[in-house]
Image (spheres, rainbow, N blue to C red):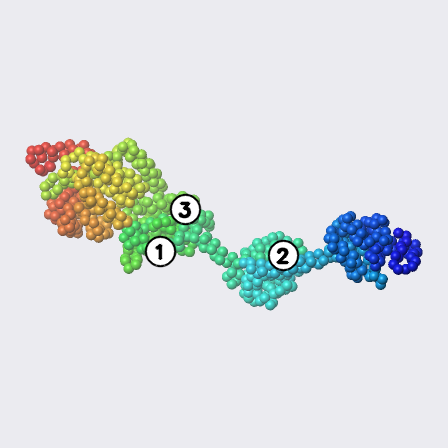
Amino acid sequence: MADFVDHAHDPEPVVPTRLLAHAINNLSLGIIIFDSRREVVFCNQRYADIYRLSSEQTKPGTGIGQLVEHRRNLSRVRSIPGNDIRERIANAAIAGTTVLELTDGRIISRTVYPMPDGGGMATHEDITDREEMSARLSRQIELGQEHEENLRIANLQFDRAINNMSQGLCFFDAAHRLIVCNDRYLDMYDLQPDRVGPGTPLGEIVDMRFEAGSFPAMTRDEYIEWRTKVAISAEPTDSIVELRNGRTFKIRHRPMPDGGWVATHEDITEQRRSEVKIEYMAHHDALTDLANRVLLNERLEQALNRRIHREQAVAVHHLDLDQFKAVNDTFGHHAGDRLLKTVADRLRALVRDTDTIARMGGDEFVIVQAPIADPAQATALAQRIIDSIGEPFEIDGHQATIGASIGIAVGPGDGLIPDKLLRNADLALYRAKGDGRGIFRFFEPAMDLQMQTRRILEQDMRRALPSGEFELYYQPVVNLASNDISGFEALIRWNHPRQGLVSPANFIPLAEEIGFIVPIGEWVIRQACTTAAAWPEGLRIAVNISAAQFRSPGLMQIIVGALGASGLHPTRLEIEITETVLLHNREAALAILHQLRSLGVRIAMDDFGTGYSSLTYLQCFPFDKIKIDRSFVKNIADNAGSLNIVRAVAALASGMGMTTTAEGVETPEQRDRIASEGCTEMQGFLFSEPLPAGEIERLYLARRAARQASGQIVAA
């Protein structure tokens, strides 16, 4: 388009110079001029390029409507409804700027300039880059505002987070100046918020902590020196700090790349107290607050290792309370616990600071006496213990009297390691209890042999029952009025394959100690019922039931089963118990006794008068018989006390409708005395020693049957 012609009302066209035409065609703006008839007068090349139109489509005389239609047909401008075209043609000469968006994404700004003659000129500028830059700028502004808001929120969240931490938090820079700290940090060290802020030097904070008393047991300079070493080490550090105000803090120091550091301060006071308490509980007895086995072993090992002079020694006292169980069962476990606490207090008053007292459980205690220069020191302490424990105790308004037996082992002679010394002290204690209680014994090598013998005996006894080595002997019980046999007491014997006949006194205590008395007792009941079932109807069989058997489940089933299997009538079975059966869980024991009585089984109290509460138990249960212990019968002829006891028991039994059997009658004089005092039966060597079932049948039952057949009653 080198020329353009104005088709307005001028009589002659105006032709610009080529230079002007060249300039117009190279403008960045697209220019179109139209007349009042809305026909193209001129458009430059930039206009055609913007809309990708041909020169034919933009030639002068082309109506604007056609031009718009061309642009729409070529999809240069987004779809325009038909009425919009007419409206745009009608308003083509109205001044204003319109932004068009082309289908290829370009944005065109069109500005209309009206002409005086009713036509107009329009410029079309491609503002795509400018709009994109403006959009990017707007987006950047939005992003900046968004980032600023996010930063504000993050800072707010950070403030909330660090100020709601359970730990104190602080940041310091490389110059040891505070960057930030949370409220918890200020509270932990009693710092004033208005005096601590960003830029506060560490030294000033230290001074403020000194003023507040929230400081460890060191000087200011010592603390600064220590903290500086931690800061410049560039190594993560965890420290436990004990403050003078009693608090304990755990400080976790973590270095920063720029030379500063961040540290968390955690108050672990309660945790440390709990740990100390748990540690204490792990090494001490909960009831008496004495050392337990764990701490005892540690102290004993330390005592053995730190003997300064070779002539120094360590004494181990193994202490057992005598008669404690009776007190515990009589007055209750609460009273027993009170007694143990009082015993612990008395022991504390007898030892030195270098000694250790431990409770081993139950009523057993161990004292490590270290160091000692001579065994005589151990002797003196043991005697003081026996004397002190022997003094009466006042427990809940009741007076209780117990004793103490002590076994002593002295190291290094009796052992170089704790286990050895404790074991040997235990062996010595076993000897002290066997020798009469209330005494002390030193360990001797022979005790070890004795204990080995005891272990062998235990092993042999456990094999004896299934091997059929046990046998029952029977001792006659004689009616004093008729001099006839009224029954027999079953007594166990052990036919050892190597040692021969073993007395019950040698194995029954061991069987009770290890709990083997229960299966032995079951066998005795079954065997005694089976044997007695073959005897004449009028004869009863008496069987001893231990306290351990009464505590074991199934006793009633065992007795009922034995009666059923043997066919023995229940009224011919007599159960003998001692008062110890009623000491432990009396209500349960009485319930069993009443069940046995309901079957017809007779109940006798054995060893009457040797315990603490025999009279009390006579009120609890209507026994059929009282057996007077042989210790009273033995001295009845020459001891007024024994005679009076036998007389009182016989009278008591008669008044309560019970029979009395005197045990251990060995002389005619003893027989006459017990008969004159009102006893109804006797049992002892005067009439017969215990014999096997075969001998009983041969010596007594056969003769008794013959005499009964001939009309005689006496069973000589």
Disc assigned to residue 341: 1
Mark 1 and mark 3 lie on one chain; the one further toward the N terminus is 1
Inter-mark Cα distance, 1 to 3: 29 Å
- CB within 8 Å, label 2 to label 3: no
Helix, strand, or loop for circle 2? strand
- CB within 8 Å, label 1 to label 2: no
537 on left or right of 346: left
Question: Can residue 94 be spotted in the picture?
Answer: yes
Please give the name of the residue rendered at 35% of the width and 55% of the height, measured from the top-left corner.
Answer: 341
From this view, report whether residue 220 is shown above or below residue 624.
below
**Which of these two is toward me, 270 or 338?**
270
The x and y percentages for residue 224 are 61, 61
Helix, strand, or loop for circle 3? strand
Please give the name of the residue rendered at 14% of the width and 34% of the height, measured from the top-left corner.
Answer: 701
From this view, report whether residue 300 is shown above or below residue 495.
below
What is the quadrant of residue 691 in the picture?
top left
The x and y percentages for residue 518 are 28, 40
